[in-house]
Amino acid sequence: MDLLRVVATGRRSWWALLIGSAAGALLVLFGSSAPAYRASTKLLVGPLGGGYELLRSAGEQAQTYADMAVSERVLRDAGARLPAPRTPAELKGDVAVSADADSRLLTISARTSVRASAAATAGAVAAALMRAGGGRELHLVQPASAGAGRVGGPDRALVVLAALAGLLGALALVVTRDRLRVA
C-alpha cells in the first residue's frame, strides 16, 4: 500500500480519525490524577536579630529543620491533629520542605485534593515541627494558605500527544479495514 492510498483512505474516513483523536485526548484528560491544591507556610529559623555568626549558624540549621519536618515523629504528630487523621506514610508523599540557608526561611508545602486540607496539612506540619524542638528557634512568617488555583492535572503536551496517538491508532484501523475489504 502506498502513501497516496493511505491518504485517500484517511480522507474518506475523516470522521473516524477525528473520533480517534478526541478519544485519545479525552482519555488523558479524564483518566489522569485528580487536580490538587498546594498550600505553604514559611518559618524563620533562628533569632529575629543578632550578629553575623549567630545568623549564619541559624541558616545552617535550616536544612536540619527541613529534614526534621518530614521525619516520622513530626509527621505522626501532624497527621494525628488533622481533622481527618492521616498516617506519616500518607503525609510523606504530600508534604515537601525546602530550606534556604541565606534567608533562613523554611518553606513547608502540602499538596492535597481539597484546598482547605492542603492548608491544614501545611499548618499542622509546621506546628508539629515547632512542638518537636524548634519552638524557640522557629518563628512563623507566613501562615499556611492555599493558592487560588489548582495545581496538577494533565500537562497540555501530554494531551496533544494522546490526541496524536489516537489519530494514528484510528488511521491504522481505517487502513486495515480498507485492506481487508480489498482482499
Image (cartoon, rainbow, N blue to C red):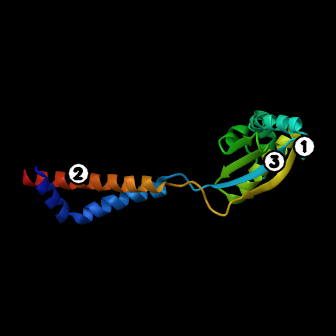
Q: Measure the alpha-carbon separation of dots 2 and 1.
A: 67 Å
- Categorize mark 1 by other alpha carbons within 10 Å: few (<14), some (14-19), many (20+): some
Q: Amino acid at mark 1?
A: Pro
Separation of marks 3 and 2 at Cα, in angstroms: 57 Å
Residue at 39% across, 56% down:
160
Q: Quadrant of residue 96?
A: top right
Q: Which mark is residue 172?
A: 2
Q: Residue furthest left?
A: 183
Tag nearer the camera, 3 or 2: 3
**Amino acid tagged 2:** Ala
Q: Secondary structure at mark 3?
A: strand
Residue density around tag 2, few if under 14, some if 14–19, many if 20 or more, within 10 Å: some
Seen from the viewer's position, the closer of residues 146 and 12 is: 146
Within 10 angstroms of label 3, few (less than 14), some, or many (20 or more) residues? many
Q: Position of residue 183 (x, y in %)?
A: 7, 50
Per the image, the residue denoted by label 3 is 43
Q: Position of residue 103 (x, y in %)?
A: 78, 45
- Residue 177 drawn above or below residue 134: below
- In terms of secondary structure, where does tag 1 sit? loop
Q: Is residue 90 above or below residue 174?
A: above
Which residue is found at the position 23% from the left and 53% from the top? Answer: 173
Circle on res. 47: 1
**Amino acid type, callout 3:** Leu
Q: Is residue 49 left or right of residue 166?
A: right
- Expressed as whole percent of the image width and height from the top left, the position of residue 107 reads 74, 47
Q: Is residue 124 above or below residue 150?
A: above
